[in-house]
């Protein structure tokens, strides 16, 4: 059955069970941020042929990834989700089962993070487009911004980078990595699954917020956290934070957050994937070193301090183990929409 067979009312009937109770039916949803909190609003758009395709992403994964991208933006602001709205532009020839799986993927991700769909819109289009707006709440003194990094702050990443980019390459060319004769066949398959899963089912780091709250509560003095998520690449995130804060950074190559799967499958390009691959949806945070050490310990595997905020406007990657010249990071090598 195609969407054109079901009609608008049929589509609404199909979608309604995926929405939170008592939120659909009026012209808008009413949202109440907790007392003392600011409302955070973020929007992300995914377009067929640009952000997803049948070659690399099932409808379920499109739903998951579209939600994850928005929840990651909330996490990057320090905000807890209150709900999302979903705007869909769909070709009439799209199978209804694709739409059903899309919402199942959305729901699976939303349930994991304790939130749901509170509204949206449907329209006809020649290309499938998923536009999601996420609403979140954050205390005024816990807002994470890109512009508040301080000289001397440690730079923390919450997990590995480059896996999503590598997973996309494997989906586009399944023969990649098959010549890794030094890797056991079972290990090869495990590495492939880890990398592909990183691309298809990214995990927004909302789990970091309770840890940060605990560190704030236990700290002997007030501290601020600057940061953003790394959806457009680790290098892009660091450069944007430094530009917004009018500072620079020195990064240590030996601490780059590269997973064993990435280094095993793509040893020659692992660093570039980690810096510029994008869509890892980890957080890049700047804070006093003592707090950063506690945060990394509490997060565990994948989290690392990768450098320090400096006074010079340059953002450089150094390698103390070799005599290689420093690498100057920029945004141009990462993903650009235009």
Image: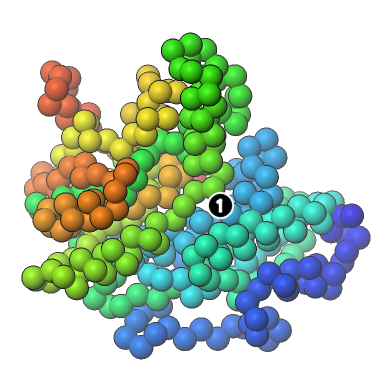
Question: x, y percentage for residue 105?
Answer: 64, 56
Foreground pick, 318 / 170: 170
The residue depicted at 31 percent of the width and 44 percent of the height is: 301
* Label 1 environment density (alpha carbons within 10 Å; few <14, some 14–19, many ≥20): many
On screen, 241 above or below 116? above
Callout 1: SS: helix
Q: Is residue 186 left or right of residue 332?
A: right
Residue in the foreground of this view, choosing between 149 and 166: 166
Residue 250, placed above or below residue 323:
below
Tally of numbered tags: 1
Horizontal and vertical percent for residue 261?
42, 30
Q: Residue at x 48, y 25 (%)?
A: 187
Compare residues 216 and 232 and report the one nearer the observer: 216
Quarter of the image for residue 268 reads: top left
Relative to 269, residue 12 above or below: below
Instruction: Name which residue lies at 38% across and 21% down.
Output: 267
Report the coloring of the rendering: rainbow
Residue that label 1 marks: 65
Q: Position of residue 240 (x, y in %)?
A: 29, 50
Tell me the residue at 47%/86% (across/down).
Answer: 32
The x and y percentages for residue 119 are 63, 75
| Image: 114 above or below 3 | below
Residue 193 shows up from this direction: yes
């Amino acid at each position: 059955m195609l969407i054109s067979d079901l009609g608008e009312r049929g589509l609404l009937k199909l979608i309604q069970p995926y929405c939170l109770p008592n939120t659909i039916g009026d012209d808008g949803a009413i949202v109440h941020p907790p007392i003392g909190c600011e409302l955070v609003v973020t929007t992300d758009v995914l377009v067929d042929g640009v952000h997803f395709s049948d070659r690399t992403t099932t409808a379920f994964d499109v739903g998951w990834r579209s939600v994850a991208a928005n929840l990651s933006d909330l996490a990057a602001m320090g905000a807890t989700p209150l709900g999302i709205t979903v705007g869909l532009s769909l070709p009439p020839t799209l199978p209804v089962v694709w739409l059903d799986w899309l919402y199942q993927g959305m729901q699976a991700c939303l349930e994991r993070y304790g939130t749901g769909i509170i509204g949206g819109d449907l329209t006809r289009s020649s290309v499938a487009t998923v536009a999601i707006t996420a609403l979140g709440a954050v205390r005024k003194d816990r807002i994470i911004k890109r512009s508040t990094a301080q000289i001397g702050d440690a730079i923390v990443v919450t997990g590995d980078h480059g896996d999503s980019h590598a997973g996309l390459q494997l989906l586009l060319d399944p023969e990649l990595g098959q010549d890794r004769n030094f890797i056991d066949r079972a290990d090869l398959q495990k590495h492939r699954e880890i990398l592909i899963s990183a691309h298809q089912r990214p995990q927004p780091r909302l789990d970091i917020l309770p840890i940060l709250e605990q560190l704030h509560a236990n700290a002997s003095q007030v501290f601020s956290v600057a940061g953003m998520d790394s959806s457009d690449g680790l290098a892009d995130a660091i450069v944007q934070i430094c530009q917004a804060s009018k500072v620079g950074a020195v990064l240590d190559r030996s601490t780059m957050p590269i997973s064993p799967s990435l280094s095993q499958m793509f040893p020659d390009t692992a660093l570039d994937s980690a810096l510029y691959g994008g869509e890892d949806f980890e957080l890049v945070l700047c804070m006093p070193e003592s707090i950063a050490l506690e945060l990394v310990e509490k997060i565990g595997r994948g989290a690392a301090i990768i450098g320090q905020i400096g006074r010079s406007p340059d953002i450089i990657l150094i390698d103390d183990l070799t005599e290689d010249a420093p690498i100057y990071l920029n945004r141009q090598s990462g993903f650009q929409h235009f």
